[in-house]
C-alpha cells in the first residue's frame, strides 16, 4: 500500500491553517471584544461581540447534566473527528473537492473541540443578519465547518455516478 503524501500534506495543511486562523481570531476577540459593548458594522448587518459558549451550535447542550455534556459535547465529537480524519486520509474514492471539504470541517471541529476540552467553552464573537433575522453567534472554526458542509451540498443533488 503506497502512502499518498500529497493528500496527507493537503489535509494536514488545511487543518493547521484553519486551527491557526481560528486560535488567532479567538485570541484577538478575547483581547479586543471582551467586556465591551456590541460593535455594529454595515448598517448592523455584521456584529462583533464576545461570548463564551459552553454548548454546541446555538448553545445547544449547555443545560445538559455534566455527564451528558461530556458524552455529547466532548467524547462524541472526538470520536467523530477521529473517524473523519482517517476517512479523509485513507479513503481512496474521495476526490480533491471532498478532501478539501472534509479537511475544512476537521480544522474547525478540532479547533472548537480543543477549546471545549481545554477551557470548557468556546469563544464566539461574530453575528450577521437583519432586524428580526440573525444568525447565532459564531467563530472562524464554525465558518470553516459551514464552508465544508456547503461544499458537500452539490453532491447531495447529483445522482449516483
Image (spheres, rainbow, N blue to C red):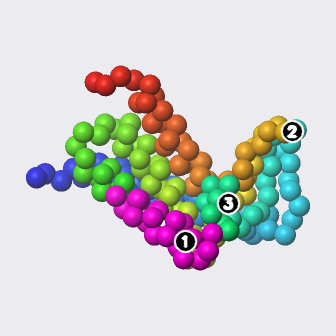
Q: Residues within 10 Å of mark 3 (few under 14, many from 20)?
A: some
Q: Is residue 28 visible?
A: no
**SS of the residue at dot 3?**
helix
Q: CA distance from mark 3 to mark 2?
A: 21 Å
**Above or below for 44 versus 85:** above
**Which is nearer the N-term, disc 3 or disc 2?**
3
Q: Is residue 1 left or right of residue 47?
A: left
Q: Nearer the viewer, residue 85 or 4?
A: 85
Instruction: From the top left corner, tell me how far across and down residue 61 is, in percent.
Output: 62, 63
**SS of the residue at dot 1?**
helix
Q: Residue at x 45, y 64 (%)?
A: 76
Question: In the rendering, which numbered label is found on residue 68?
Answer: 1
Q: Nearer the viewer, residue 65 or 116?
A: 65
Q: Is residue 19 visible?
A: yes
Question: In the rendering, which numbered label is found on residue 131?
Answer: 2
Q: Magenta segment: does it hold 147?
A: no
Instruction: From the top left corner, tell me how far across and down residue 2 is, in percent.
Output: 13, 51
Decide: marks 3, 2 in contact (CB < 8 A)?
no
Q: Which residues are magenta?
A: 64-83
Q: Nearer the viewer, mark 3 or mark 2?
A: 3
Q: Quadrant of residue 51?
A: bottom right
**Above or below for 65 versus 129:** below
Q: Nearer the viewer, mark 1 or mark 3?
A: 1
Q: CA distance from mark 1 to mark 2?
A: 35 Å
Question: In the rendering, which numbered label is found on residue 59?
Answer: 3
Amino acid at each position: 500500500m503506497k502512502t499518498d503524501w500529497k493528500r496527507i500534506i493537503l489535509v494536514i495543511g488545511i487543518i493547521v491553517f484553519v486551527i491557526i486562523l481560528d486560535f488567532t481570531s479567538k485570541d484577538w476577540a478575547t483581547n479586543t471584544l471582551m467586556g465591551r459593548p456590541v460593535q455594529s458594522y454595515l448598517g448592523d448587518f455584521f456584529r462583533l461581540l464576545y461570548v463564551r459558549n459552553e454548548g454546541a451550535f446555538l448553545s445547544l447542550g449547555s443545560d445538559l447534566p455534566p455527564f451528558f455534556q461530556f458524552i455529547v459535547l466532548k467524547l462524541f465529537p472526538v470520536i467523530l473527528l477521529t473517524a473523519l480524519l482517517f476517512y479523509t486520509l485513507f479513503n481512496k474514492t474521495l476526490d480533491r473537492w471532498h478532501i478539501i471539504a472534509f479537511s475544512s470541517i476537521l480544522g474547525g471541529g478540532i479547533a472548537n473541540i480543543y477549546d471545549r476540552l481545554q477551557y470548557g467553552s468556546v469563544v464566539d464573537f461574530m453575528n450577521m443578519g437583519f432586524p428580526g433575522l440573525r444568525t447565532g453567534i459564531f467563530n472562524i472554526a464554525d465558518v470553516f465547518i459551514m464552508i465544508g458542509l456547503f461544499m458537500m451540498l452539490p453532491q447531495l443533488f447529483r445522482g449516483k455516478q
